[in-house]
Every structure is written in structure tokens, then in C-alpha cells.
Amino acid sequence: MLAIGLRHDIMAAELAIDARWLHTGIGTYTLNLLYALAVEKNGLRLHAITGQSNLERISPFCDRITVVDTPIYTIREQWQVLWAARRSDLLHVPHYNVPLLRKRKLVTTILDLIHLTDPECRANLAKQIYALSMMRAAAKKADHVITISEYSKSQIVERLKVPPEKVTVIYCSVSDRFSPGVPESVTAARESLGLTAPYLLYVGDLRPYKNIGRLLQAFHAARQRLGEESNLVFVTRDVTRARRLRQEYAGLDSWPFIRFLHMVEDEMLPLIYSGAAAVIMPSLMEGFGLPVLEAMASGAPVICSRAASLPEVGGDAVAYFDPHSVTDLASTMERVCTSETLRSGLAAKGLERAKQFSLQESARKHIDVYYRVLGWE
């Protein structure tokens, strides 16, 4: 472990954040929190615990950094994170892998219970035992639990036997980099990636609960009515599952119009959102559904599953469908993509809706939790 002092201003208390995992939803949540707290920390000195490869990304936001190059879900992280945060007044772990021997103040964020509810995870008994035992231990050990939707809170209270007053819902925030792109930049981004307009867009991994099979079938069913030039684009790092999907649904003759983009730079993503005819979130379960929020903030119309937490995010600013019905998804795609009036209306509503999920509001609510745990109320 390597400790790095960045600034030496005197703060009232030191907040340590486990920032080793900066990928997927956990990483986005952590990065947005670090960025927001750097502006709004109000009496807290920010100490990040992270890997060597993350230093450049997060050092501008922190007063102190300790390098811990230990993977998550390991025995070694239990004592290394514990030691790294030993002098911090409060430790916030944005996942359920908390150091169980910590004696000082501890906050954990449990984004969702998908590790317990996803059929793919339930099929692996060892993972199920680890996830359930660690989640219950984390919820019991922590002074307070943060989660990201009322849907997730209800599951945490019920499945992990946590008192409701111990759990606070703080919705995810959206980075300022997600905003409507100017047409020239959107066109340039699309051309640089070899995309053809119009395209429907999916962003995220391809795990079974994401409901990608029904999305592929719905696109196949709707494509002719959407127009011969219509495309379906996936932005995903999930190369292995993309290959499996091609094999499983090889009989669909719409594959020439389906693209998987596995390497997309962060600065390109808002432009890809902005250029989409519609962004689709077909999931059967989600703790929050960040792509819905990112798409709305980027000015894209959104087609969204009416399931789990997603209505909390989309409100009345998205077009909903039944995630179990290929027919309903296909007809919703047709309805949105063939009506410029509907697309414009959804895009305008989405932009207004996204303003409710600001970094500043998220930081303020996190600080309220930190203050309560520290006894500063």
C-alpha cells in the first residue's frame, strides 16, 4: 500500500471511500460521488483508496489517496482496506464487500440485490452463499446503508432483514458530460464508428436479466416497419455474451443490421446517445438503470421496460413496454421511431427529468448521511 498526500488543508473529519472498482455501475456511482464531493464536501477531508491505475482519474478530487491494488471479492481486501482506512473517521464502501473487522464508522452502498435475484447468479451456489452472507454481514456491520432506488430499499429491508430507518435512498446522479450533442459532433462520432442512421441503441452488459433475447426478437419483428435502413447498436464490453447471442439467435435474418461496439471512449458515449433514434432499456430487473438517465440527459428519446426500479428513473418521460412481451416491445419501437412528434416530446421531457438527478443533490444527500453517522446533526 502506498499513501499519497495531495492537499494539506485542515478538515473536521476524514472520509475514506473505497474507489478500487471504477467499472460498470459501481464505478460510475463512485466516480460521480468523488467528483461531487470534491465540490460539496462541507467539512470532510476526502481520502480515496484505489488502485495504481486509477490515480490519474481520481487524484484531482481527493485530499489523500492510498493505493491498494487488491481485487474485490478477496480475503486479502478485508485486511488491506481495513488498514488503509484505519485513521479515517468514516469509511464508505460503495458495495457490499466491507471490511468486517472495522471498529470505526462505516457506511455501505448496496446498489441492488441482483446477485441474489438473478437466475444466472442463483445457478452458482458458491456465489449465492458468498453474496447472501456478505450482504447480510455488510448490512448488519454498517452504521448506515445507502441504496439507489425505493425498489432496492424494499428488497434490502425484506431480504436482508434491515430496519427501514437504517436505509437511505439516494438516486444516482448524471455526469455533466451527458448533454445533447451538437449535430456536427454527433455526425462525426457516428461516422468515426461506422454507424448508419437511424439506429436504436442499447448500452450495458448482456447478462440474462437484461432481456437482450427479447430485444433482438422485437427488432427482428419490427425492422421492416421501422424502415430498411434501421439498425440496432449495442455498446457493451461483454464480448463473450455477444458471441453467445449471435449463436443462440443465428436464425434471425436481421443480423446484418445489428452492431456490437465493444471499445467506445467515454467522451464518445454522450454523442452516441444523442444520435440515437431511441435508446432502449429492456431489463427485467435493475437497481436503478443508469443508461436511462444518461440517455435522457443526452437528449435521446427512451423506450423503457416497466419493471423494477425503472419507472422511478423514467417517470413520465419515457415510453414503457411490458418486458415479458416481444410484441409489446416491437410495437413500442414502431410507435416511437415512426413519429417525430413523439420522439421530440420524449426527448424534451427526458431533458427536464434528468435535471432532477444532479451531482450536487446527490452529494448533499450523501453528506447528510455522513453527518448523521458522525453525530454532527
Image (tube, grey):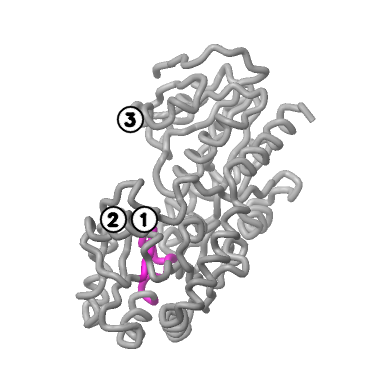
Mark linked to residue 189: 2
In three-dimensional space, the C-alpha distance between marks 2 and 1, rounded to whole angstroms, equals 7 Å
Could you tell which of marks 3 and 2 lies nearer the N-terminus? 3
In three-dimensional space, the C-alpha distance between marks 1 and 3, rounded to whole angstroms, equals 26 Å
Disc 3 versus disc 2: nearer the observer: 2
Which of the two residues, 274 or 119, is positioned nearer the viewer here? 274
Q: What is the x, y in percent for residue 353?
A: 60, 60
Task: State yes or no: discs 2 and 1 in contact (Cβ < 8 Å).
Answer: yes
Could you tell which of marks 2 and 1 lies nearer the N-terminus? 2
In the displayed structure image, the side of residue 275 where residue 87 appears, left or right: right
Q: Which image quadrant for residue 365?
A: top right
Q: Amino acid at mark 3?
A: Ser
Q: What is the x, y in percent for residue 337?
A: 41, 78
Could you tell which of marks 1 and 3 lies nearer the N-terminus? 3
Residue found at x 66% / y 38%: 364
In the displayed structure image, the side of residue 324 where residue 14 appears, left or right: right
Which class describes the residues within 10 Å of circle 1: few (<14), some (14-19), or many (20+)?
A: many
Which class describes the residues within 10 Å of circle 3: few (<14), some (14-19), or many (20+)?
A: few
Which class describes the residues within 10 Å of circle 2: few (<14), some (14-19), or many (20+)?
A: many
In this view, which residue lies farthest toward the right?
377
Residue at image mark 1: 271
Disc 1 versus disc 3: nearer the observer: 1
Residue at image mark 3: 53
